[in-house]
Image: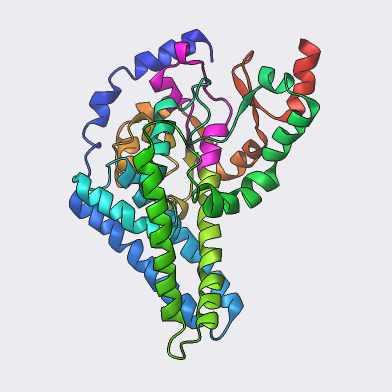
Amino acid sequence: MTKEQEEQIINDLKDWKKLIKPYASPETHLAWKQIFNTILPFIGIFILAAILYEYSLIATLVVCVVGGLFLTRVFIIQHDCGHNAFFPDRKKNDVTGFITSFLTCIPYKYWARSHNHHHAHQGQLDTRTIGDVNLLTVREYEALSKFEKLKYRVYRSFPVMFIIGPAYYIFVHNRIPFITLKGWDKERKMLHFTNLFLVLFFAVLGLLLSLPSFDLAYGFKKLAFIYVPILLTFVFTAIWFFYMQHQHDPNYKAWKKDWEYVLAAIKGSSYYKLPAILNFFTGNIGYHHLHHLAPKIPFYKLKKCSEENPIFQKHVSEITWWGSLKYAFYVLWDEENNRMIKFSHLKKIRVRS
């Protein structure tokens, strides 16, 4: 983007707070509606999977994939609670967020704080350590040793990002308090408490699934067969959509001294144009530019806000499902040209320089 384009976006959206205000207000009856059409079906799917397990493992896995999609939507509820944007009342948000964390296995307070850090610094090149996928600039990458370059290439490869990464994220990254900054003591303690509660929660589920014979080995084997595919479907879906909506091109990233909040939201996040069914399961995550502009808008109001205020669509980077596939391979920030690039683009940059 040129400076003129940046100034145009900022000028066009100078009244964004006024436009956002009618939508940045959670409503209790709409929040409960999301719970009924999300958590209750998820519980029903889990019960169905437990029944099908006795007859067909393939059918069980198919149902678990659907369960994973519903769990993605459960996580969006937890996510909005972390922004205090699901219920009007903070206590209800915290209770709901904590309870849903048992289903998602994502620690509520610890994750919410790291995610809010991401919102406050998204697109800032000075701050790329919390709540974000590690991203290097071309200059930083070129300054690495051959071994460090190899490590970064492996880290940003498709298998690591989207196959190994989701499993690591759910079973390791969110189990250990890797963030050791001062002032995070409460969140680290809550992470440990969450791990303890998760052990108790799944112990109870395993016991229930072992009935009526009280065959504990059978019950926990059944639980693992059902819940691991559900978790992996959920975390793959969540990582895919969150990842794509910040790795697109054109994009916006800047050092803190030049960083603009509005530009980081509108150009540093995208509008992922998805079918209605995916908008449902992902809790309207496609309207990511709006969410970053105003995280207090509940996910159940994002679509309405977008449709009633077309100015928010004027400058955003719009991506589609098929069009987004290439962004899985955009792995470096080219400061000279202000764009995301692939490793294959490096040869052209080296020739120009």
Specify how the rendered protein is coloured.
rainbow
On the picture, is 153 further left or further right than 273? right
Image coordinates for residue 175, horizontal then vertical, percent? 49, 51
Residue drawn at x 27%, y 20% is: 15
Q: Which residues are magenta?
A: 242-271
Could you tell me if residue 283 is visible in this image? no
On the picture, is 15 further left or further right than 200? left
Query: For residue 208: magenta?
Result: no
- The answer to whether 86 is drawn above or below residue 74 in the figure is above
Image coordinates for residue 179, horizontal then vertical, percent? 48, 37
Pick the front one: 318 or 198: 198
Image coordinates for residue 41, horizontal then vertical, percent? 37, 67
- The answer to whether 319 is drawn above or below residue 279 in the figure is above
Q: Quadrant of residue 311?
A: top left
Could you tell me if residue 192 is visible in this image? yes
How many marks are shown on the rendered structure? 0
Pick the front one: 104 or 301: 104
Quadrant of the image containing the N terminus: top right
Pick the front one: 30 or 239: 239
Residue drawn at x 35%, y 50% is: 78
Pick the front one: 346 or 135: 135
On the picture, is 236 further left or further right than 257? right
Residue drawn at x 26%, y 58% is: 33
